[in-house]
Structure formats: C-alpha cells, structure tokens
Amino acid sequence: MLAVATLAALAALSGVNAYNNGLALTPQMGWNTWNHFGCGISEDTILGAAKAIIANNLTQFGYEYVLMDDCWHAPARDNTTGAPVADPEKFPNGIKDLADKIHALGLKFGIYSDAGTYTCGGRFGSLGYEEIDAQTYAEWGVDYLKYDNCFNEGLAGTPLISHERYANMSRALNATGRPILYSMCNWGEDGPWNFAVTIANSWRISGDIMDNFDRADDRCPCTDMLDCKLPGFHCSVAKIIDFAAPVGQKAGPGRWNDLDMLEVGNGGMSFDEYVTHFSMWSLLKSPLILGNDITNMTNETLTIITNKAIIDINQDAIGSPANRMWKRSVNEGGDLSLWAGSLANNSFVFALLNTSPAEQTVYLDFVDVFFDQGKAYQTQAYDVSDLWQKDVAGNWGKSIGTIQGGFNVTIGSHQTKVWRATPVQSANAKRAYGEL
Ligand code: GLA
C-alpha cells in the first residue's frame, strides 16, 4: 500500500499524470490583454506591456508570459490556404515579428482562439481548423494558447463531447513539436477538472471574473460549478473562491484550476479586497495572469503583485492547492473561512478569509489547521510568519513567534491573512527521526 501511495505521490510531483508537454509544473504567470484592454489591442499595447514587465522587474517574481487575447484577427482567414490571419492595421508587422520581439526581451508569447465557429468577440474560431491553426501558431513562435468556448455548435453537454472538442487542439499542438502551454477556457462546463487533466495544462473553472469583491449578479447565475448549466460572466471574486473550493483536489503539477485572470489594479476593489484576490488565487494554485495596465501601476498594485512570500506559495514545488477546512456564517452576513495546505519541505500555509462587512475575531485552532496531518502535527509547536507583513530586512513574511495549539486573530472586513508554518522540531522529534 505504502509503495503504491508513494508512487502516486511521485507521479503527481513530476507531473507525469498531467498533459504530457512538460509545461506549467507550477502555475503559469504572466499578463493578458483582456481584462483591461478588451478588444482595443494592437502591437503597441502588447509590446508596451512586455517592456513594462521588464522595467518593473516582474520576471524576477516569475511573470513570463505575454498573452494576446481576443480580437487580434483579420476579418477572415486566408481564402486559399485557410490559415489564420492577423488584423493588418493592429499588427502591421505580423504576429511572428511581435513574437520575435517578445522573445528578444526574454519573455514568452501567447495567443487566443476558440473551440467554436467564432471567438467570443465574433472573430473566426478554430473548430475544424485545429491543425492549420496549431501549425501556424508554432510557425509564428507561439508559446501558449488560451482556447475559449463560444459558438461551440452545441458540442458540449457531456464530458466526452467537451473532451473530444478540446483534445483535438491538444493533439494538434503536440503534433507541431513546439512546446505550447495549453490553457483551456471552457468556463467549467462539463467538469474539466475531471476530463481535461490529461489534455491541458489548465482549465477555467467558472464564468468570467468581474472587478468586484462580492456583488451578486444574475449573469453569473450558478451557486456552484459542479452542476452548472450557465457559467455566464460577471462572477465576483468571493463567488469564484467558493466555486474553487471543492475542485482543488484535482489540480497538481502540469494541471491547474484557472480561477480567471487577475483584476488587481483595475480599480473596482479596495486594497484589502485585492490582497484577498491575490492571496486566494495563490493558495488555490491558479495561474497568476495579471489583467491590469502594467505600464501605469500604483505602488499599492505593485506591492500586491510582487509579494514574493505569497507568490512562493503559488509556485511551491508540490503544487497542492489549499483546502477549505471550515466556513462559518457570521451575524453581519458573509462568512469566515479557514484554508490550509501543504508545502514542500514539511512547511504549511494557512489563511483566514473574512467576506463579511465587519471585523471579526476568531480562535484559529491547530486541530483544524492540521486536521489532515493528524494529532502529532496538531499538537506540536510551529514557527509562524505572517506573509502580508515584512520582516526587519524588508522581506515579506514577518515572524509572529513560536505557536502551539492555536491563536486568536482579529481580521477586518474583506481581508485575508496568510501564514506560513514550519514545525519547531523538539529533541524528542529529532530522536524519532534519528537526527540526535
Ligand atoms: C470569454 C473568455 C474571456 C475572454 C473573452 C474574449 O468571455 O472567458 O476570458 O477571453 O471571451 O472575447
């Protein structure tokens, strides 16, 4: 039994039970045009963002993909070859030239298409054109494909039908011989966390995000994603976190739940709300794809997106999303929830999230934090650091001391607090491990 369990753990670690292209062993990081620019994109928008990644030193934090979303297309494909063609006004030098320029900056380049007749913005889609499109992308030097779900001609409704439609592009990408990260965007339809694990590096789990913390909106009508018939759009951050809670178990190296692109810096949320957004996307191992105008960022935005201690949680080698250990309604409305996860090298992360409109105080009991690890872990002492505070040297992650059993926390409205815990090995424990 132990050998089998160990093998399974090793397989998860090396990503071999994921889509076999060796990419996204940790969640992908980068920037995408859509959330801020929508269809208003051009070579300048994209090159400007690429240069801003370099100028702001964002590569040092892991941001590497520059992603061109919808509306790069010419009105029609090439009418003799059927190959995709870019809008010659927006991209006067063509897409290959743009990709070359992005590569010359040391970055990677991504493109967008749709597993349907048209894209969501009404441009030509790739359904039936998978091979020529994948081949053309490879010739252009594309490193990443986001593949959407509009106008899918009804080819959905069962996991098998959705799987086939998305696997066609997966096979076409593999056949090019170029490593191309495959980011499925079918909004959680038919449960991609079940069927996409071996064909894609990530899959969206919900309708489109909106730049708002918790506003209810009927355009995002489902209360959970497990049986959702209309993923929609205008999904709030709090709602997407709820959607993500049960499906974390399906993610791992090379295969991630995509909670949608970040809204940090787009203006619809407070500092605390953006901290919650960035923290939870990190703990749940979502791709971290910036969606703001990175050529023009406030210090607050930069502070959030460069919190190295939080990014380290997202990029941790074992790739295990945090789980919600409990969720409790509070009198003022909304709820408090405790999230906990394992990290490499016997370290742990845990977080408290307050979606209520009022400050809350709660005792964080290590019986809950370390429920999965059992009694020995629940009762031992930990060195604990707060990942949204800086230490004396100015690094994120300030020690709050050695803690055993649990501690009281007061947390403001819409805040998330995140801690990292490492066991303080007692002499007895060291003896047991043969270290003394
Ligand atoms: C869909 C996707 C979005 C974006 C738009 C582009 O709504 O879910 O992320 O790509 O299409 O039209």
Image (cartoon, rainbow, N blue to C red):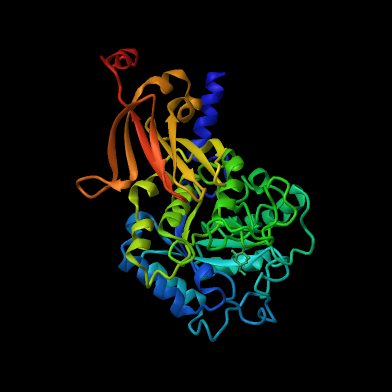
Q: Give x and y (percent) for residue 350.
A: 43, 37
Image quarter of residue 169: bottom right
Q: Residue at x 51, y 31 (%)?
A: 9
In the image shown, does 150 or 220 lie closer to the viewer? 220
Image quarter of residue 62: bottom left
Extreme residue in the front direction: 331
Q: Residue at x 36, y 66 (%)?
A: 53
Q: Give x and y (percent) for residue 298.
A: 35, 67
Left or right position of 167 against 236 = right
Q: Visible in this render: residue 202?
A: no
- Quadrant of ligand 1: it is bottom right
Left or right position of 152 against 200 = right
Q: Give x and y (percent) for residue 284.
A: 50, 45
In the image shown, does 7 or 325 lie closer to the viewer? 325
Q: Visible in this render: residue 382?
A: yes
Q: Residue at x 73, y 69 (%)?
A: 117
Left or right position of 250 against 394 = right
Q: Which residue is drawn at 69% across and 60% down?
A: 218
Q: Give x and y (percent) for residue 11.
A: 53, 34
Q: Quadrant of the C terminus?
A: top left
Q: Is residue 432 above or below residue 270?
A: above
Left or right position of 393 against 183 = left
In the image shown, does 28 or 93 lie closer to the viewer? 28
